[in-house]
Amino acid sequence: DLWVPSTDQVEPQQSWQVAGGLAYNWNKDYEVSLEAYYKRMSNIIAYKDGASFVDVNGDWESQVAAGLGKSYGLELFIQKKTGRFTGWLGYTLAWSNRLFDRPGEEINFGEEFSYRYDRRHDISLVGVYELGEGVDVSATWVYGTGVAVTLPLQKFEGVGFQEYYSTLYEYGERNSFRMGAYHRLDVGINFVKQKKRGERVWNFSFYNAYNRQNPFFVYQGRDDDGENVFRQVNLFPVIPSISYTRRW
């Protein structure tokens, strides 16, 4: 993310948003809501094509372009509030785009493109079941469409004159590739016991229980035959944990 102060050349970013929704409750046991939103942004800044960093000690204002942004979508929420089994489902269908088409500040050839945090589908599913007095198990599953990224289409090595050589990359449209979808399952069990002075809780849990290799970032490397390939770096495998909590 790019955070810089507003100046005479870089105007403050502005946005407005409108949202509306409906909610309904059944006998205080179930709740369902559906909401739609639309957000419009102006003076959004981004690196120009070819700019790889901002030199805060130099003329960084010439490295950025200003444009427009919009985000819109639907959010569905369903919750069960009572009984031995409780939980909720949240689903979001969303779009987030950017447009930089001012003369001299075009990005992506002046065409609209998906923002880095554009995720078409986002799902959260949570369930808690009470096995007995003071014992409950829980599970949380989350899913998100892969992040939009920009990757090179071609690579040219040894480009230059005499002893000066460099590597050049040819890029296509901005954020035209998608990393793999993100999803994981967290499970746990709680043992709760009331004491004379407060409450004691033991928790045993597994983060990313089925050891999903979720992408963190992608880089260009070489395979065993020396061919250029894209490699994925993963983040956080299955992680077991034990915690003890005392409340009073």
Image: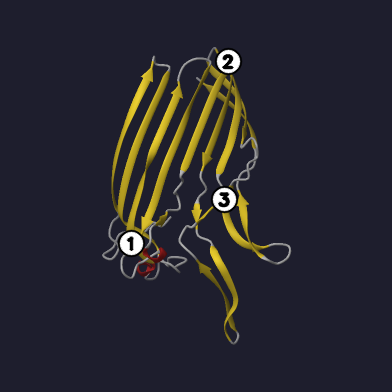
Residue 119 at what x, y percent from top left? 46, 46
Query: Considering depth in this image, is 91 or 210 the residue closer to the camera?
Result: 91
**Amino acid carrying mark 2 in the image:** Gly
Sort mark 2 into few (<14), some (14-19) or many (20+) by Cα contacts within 10 Å.
few
Q: Quadrant of residue 195?
A: top right
Residue at the disc numbered 1: 66
Q: Are marks 1 and 2 in contact (CB under 8 Å)?
A: no
The circle drawn on residue 134 is 2
Name the amino acid, label 3.
Answer: Phe
Q: Position of residue 46 (x, y in %)?
A: 39, 60
Q: Position of residue 203 (x, y in %)?
A: 60, 26
Q: Nearer the viewer, mark 2 or mark 3?
A: 3
Quarter of the picture containing the N terminus is bottom left
Question: Which mark's residue is nearer the viewer, 1 or 2?
Answer: 1
Position of residue 131 measured from the top left corner of the image (x, y, whole percent): 60, 16
Local packing at callout 1 (Cα closer than 10 Å; few below 14, some 14-19, many 20+) is many
Q: With 73 as the anchor, is 154 left or right in this view?
A: right
Work out whether residue 76 or residue 12 is closer to the camera in this orientation and state it. 76
N-terminal of the pair, mark 2 or mark 3, is: 2
**Quarter-wise, where is residue 81 in the image?**
top left
Q: Say which element carries label 3.
A: strand
Q: CA distance from mark 1 to mark 2?
A: 56 Å
Q: Residue at left 70%, top 67%? A: 226
Sequence-wise first label, 3 or 1? 1
Q: Could you tell whether 2 is left or right of 166 in the image?
A: left
The residue under the point 35% across, 34% down is 35
Answer yes or no: do the residues labelled 2 and 3 have beta carbons within 8 Å? no
Q: Mark 1 vs mark 2: which is more N-terminal? A: 1
> What residue would you read off at disc 3?
216
- Secondary structure type for disc 1: strand
Q: Is residue 104 above or below residue 12?
A: below
**Amino acid type, callout 1:** Ala
